[in-house]
Amino acid sequence: MPPSHSPIKASDLFVRALENEGVEYIFGVPGEENLDFLDSLRSSSIKLILTRHEQGAGFMAATYGRLTGKTGVCLATLGPGATNLVTPAAYAHLGAMPMLMITGQKPIKQSKQGQFQIVDVVALMKPITKFARQIVSANTIPSLVREAFRLAEQERPGAVHLELPEDIAAEMADGAHVFTPSQPRRPICDDKAIDQAVARIGTAKHPLLLVGAGANRKRVITALQAFVRKTGIPFVNTQMGKGVIGGLSEKYLGTAALSQGDYVHCAIAKADLIINAGHDVVEKPPFLMEHGGTEVIHVNFNPAAVDEIYFPQLELVGDLSASFQALTERLGRNPGHDFDTFENLRREVAAHIAENADDPRFPLCPQRIVADVRRVMPDDGIIALDNGMYKIWFARNYRTTQPNTVLLDNALATMGAGLPSAMMAAMLHPDRNVMAICGDGGFMMNSQEMETAVRLGLNLVVLVLRDNSYGMIRWKQDVGGFVDWGLEYGNPDFVAYANSYGATGHRVEATDDFLAILQGCFDKGGVHLVEVPVDYSDNKRVLIDELSVLTCKL
């Protein structure tokens, strides 16, 4: 006979299952349909982080997943609360961040309100999650929670969704049994494939390592660093692979910040073999394969998704860290490798990044902004980038020394995520310098979370780059030969705006004051907003015109 258990309220059982999974925080904006769940949460070990918008809650939960590898959890009510989680769901889904969304719903057994606020949230979430279910019985809660967490964290990680209707939350379950989380072992790539890869790397003359988003996992980072140290093979990285191997390495050639025509594309064109670590199709590809062209070894947890521009000749499928450990054991420095062109390119990139690092012009040019931020941030300092023109400049020019110190989104590439992502980083790492870097457009999309940051007592600097327009789209207008029209707007007084939330606002009015203001903010602690005007007039010249000349020379 199975052991008997005392009946337990469904919402209590749900919270107990979450505690069993090790949940520390739930971020959200509760509603009427969440009240049973909220009451159960009140007496639990889980801390509720009340945000000012569901987007803020979702972005924080996703970033928790990104930084810890554990599932971040967020909460919203039905209807508009749930639909406000759609963008964070897509953000986590495309960005491979484990996140569970819990939403409420009207009673499903009996309802007296017709279709008021009701949309089919489960159907809405299915295309942008790994798992989306409505809970229709209290007794199924333990198994559904366990399955949701398993799928959220399984490679490739992503978003999952559970809908808890109001009447189900209030009903009684038969017992309090929950499932013990399992720790599955990932399959290992077979030796034959490893041997084939070793042979191809050995016969190549100009091998190149490309580090993608899927390589940004704790154990993988260590294995890749060891591979580069032992083999001496140069590497480039995608935007979301940035920081996996430190940017101060003598083998680092640069970041693929642009889709084509950038410095790193010269290295890719020279390579006769690309070792593609953690390739993720959500990122814009830094190279397009051609039949008879450069060979590619695909090294990842999962097989390659083959299409007309990506069809690797060899695949190492299995645990990514184990694959690189096996390669490192069988490889060493190869005297037949020729990296002279890569070394020349590395010097060109270093010289280019140094240009305008001390430019005195005002408003500040992006190169000076990146250089001063790099000067003020310690090696373990974390910058969280929103989406805008500055993201390209930081991806190209900001050198990292430690993993996960540059948080950027090159998958969904949504605006509005920079501030909540930085808030999450500041919560997890209160002893480290954390900075949100936002354009004025992206900042205003979730600027109300400044109140949340102040309420949580975070140490956080929010850098707002002001150009009074949607700058990246204006750049695209310019490059595309369109008339500069329709993308300018007004802004509030950002200093007064920050002060109104209880933060401290600063305005940079001279270029030489910028670095000192940033340092002063970190020294004082608390939440600070620094408004700095930015001059994007270099965008086309540096990112398009000069690069086309360089590419032809190399």
Image: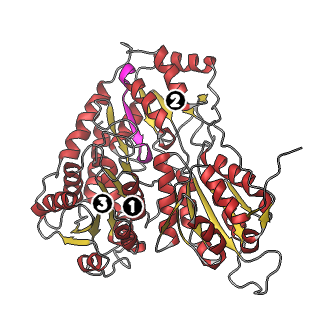
Residue at 19 percent across and 49 percent down: it is 375
Quadrant in the rendering for residue 175? bottom right
> Looking at the image, is mark 1 or mark 3 earlier in the sequence?
1
Residue, x 71% and y 46% (percent of image)?
179
| Numbered label attached to residue 380 | none
Residue to which mark 1 is pinned: 423
Q: CA distance from mark 2 to mark 1?
A: 30 Å
Quadrant for the C terminus, please: top left
**Mark 3 = which residue?**
459
Amino acid on which disc 1 is placed:
Met
Judging by the rendered image, the residue that carries numbered circle 2 is 321
Foreground of the two, 204 or 103: 103
Over which residues does the magenta segment extend?
Answer: 229-241
Left of 524 or right of it: where is 484?
right
Q: Amino acid at mark 3?
A: Asn
Tell whether 19 sits left or right of 466. Answer: right
Amino acid type for the residue under numbered disc 2 = Ser
Whether residue 482 is visible: no
Quadrant in which the N terminus is drawn? top right
